[in-house]
Amino acid sequence: MKLKLTEEQCRIIDFVKQMKRGQKLKIEAKAGSGKTSTLVEVAKANPDKRFLYLAFNKAIVNDASQKFPANVVVKTTHSLAYGKIVMPLRKKDPTFRVQGKITMFELKDWFMEHDALYKRYLKANPSDEAGEGKAYQWDSIAFVAARYNEYLNSDKEEHTQSKLFQELSRAIRDGELSYTHSFYLKEYQLLRKHPEIDQKFDCILLDEAQDTNPVTMGIVNDVTCSKILVGDSNQSIYAFRGAVNALATFQADETLYLTCCFRCNQPIVDRANYFLKKYDPTEHPFRAMRSNRPDGKSKRQSAAIIARTNSGLISAFEELLHDHSLSYQDIIFTRPPSEIFAPSLNVLKFQAGAEARELAAPFRYFKRFDDIYDLKNYAEDTSSYEVMMAIKLVEDYGHSIFGLYEKANQCAVCNFTTSDNKTITLTTAHSSKGLEFDEVALLGDFTRLADIQDEMKTLIQDGAPARDIDSVAQSLYEETNLYYVALTRARSVLFDLTENGVEFDKSTLLSSLDALSFPPSLFFLPDETREEAIKALSHPQAQQEEEQDA
């Protein structure tokens, strides 16, 4: 069955047909607007053109490779860099290996061997986090490491900061420090010329451009073939990982839009439009979404509960266990429980005095610290979010985490876009990106957007420094985007338990409920029964009065 294209999709296809080598197109595609299917139709409509589709990870490569026609090659940027940079090294030395990252302890040992160079850098680069007198303290090491990682994840050509950075790069090349994925990608970008791309392809397709690596964008900018960037600026949610919204800076010859949502019905789209228009602090013009789905009742073939944090996710799981109508087979995680629980479990073991060998390998460095308070200070000094969150979960749940983890391991884990009508998928907002469900419940641990906006207004009124205002504005942008991503996972029904939901519609029955009082079994009740249950939960006093009158 041939796909019926919208006017917006036809406009994009027609433009690409006329594109000349070196031209640039930017596509702003709202949630559920069919951006991937649009790119597939673009490729089909241009069989004489050779496309390189740059994907974020291997999972996307595998999925996209099955969708695109033969004139599209799907790769990650890392795979391009690996073939050009790493493979020649492996031919010379078959034992050569690439590591995930350079540890703080590896850096500390290297810095101690380059004491004079290190101290000279700290003296020349004073900051709130580091300076003279802080040599070899965790905050000063983290400061230097962060600056070097910023360089590795930027499109800058030279080590402009100091000789220390040059020496760090030399040490990686010479095997004194771990050779990492981010390092060889940077080495590939620094080549500046990429004939293996320019000679083979007519056009690059960069999907998810709102969350791209600056190094990847540097590579894209350096090639001479045509470029098409696709993404949604309001789905930019990975800035904390160093990602940037390339759509905001990309100088395109033409900008086209996909605003017709095939996923969400109009009430959900109305909610998304409301929050994007009110809270997006960026200056790009607001373009409202419109729905291409009927507003009828959900068939409830899939359901999900979305939390803002891992802590909220674990709380939701605990609540599900209290519902005796559910079994472990009814609950699905989108990430393995080992990933969700491992940091907290190892914090608990460390707190209890476990030996290093009893800790999982990634957490054995905990034994370098005297106690949990020392570890907490390290996590705060180095901005180790994972460890800070793990410590908080331990403070909230204590040893009951072990029991919750054992129970979570009895549940299923999947990365599919849907679940069946007998299951509930548990996920965080970040992990939910790319997924969709008939019915979704958003838990109450999402940030209240109005509070951040009020803080920003107060700073402006008080004449606060621009950097302070920008910091709060960035937080508002990220939290608005994350909320938008979460609520647009729903096709037909959204139970919005957030404070934002209360603001949108105070008459929404479930909006005023506490997150943990939401009974997941509502997903499985017949529609009529469910409506009565919602009313009872929302107006318990009125129900009691009715029963007394009867």
Image (cartoon, helix red, strand yellow):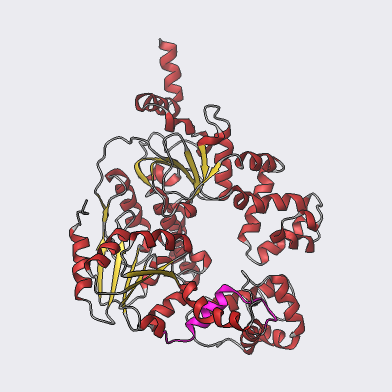
Indicate the quadrant containing the C terminus: top left, top right, bottom left or bottom right: top left
The answer to which of 306 and 405 lies nearer the viewer is: 405
On the picture, is 131 further left or further right than 520?
A: right
In the image, residue 456 lies at what x, y percent?
A: 45, 62
In the depicted structure, whether residue 507 falls above or below residue 480: above
Which residue is nearer to you in this view: 100 or 492? 100
- Decide whether residue 178 is among the magenta residues: yes
- Which residues fall within the magenta stretch? 175-194
Identify which residue, 299 or 57, lies in the foreground: 57
Left or right: where 419 falls relative to 265: right
| Left or right side of 20 for 30 | right
Could one spot residue 457 in this view of the protein? no
Which quadrant of the structure image shows residue 280?
bottom left
The percent position of residue 47, horizontal first and vertical second, equals 24, 70
> Where is residue 238 drawn, in percent x and y?
48, 63
Q: Please, is residue 292 above or below residue 65 in the view?
A: above
Q: Residue visible at 72% across and 74% down?
A: 106
Numbered label tally: 0
- The answer to whether residue 17 is visible is yes
Q: Identify the residue shown where x is 30% and y is 71%.
A: 26
The answer to if 242 sits in the magenta stretch is: no
**For the view shown, which residue lies furthest in the top direction?**
550
Q: Position of residue 498 (x, y in %)?
A: 45, 44
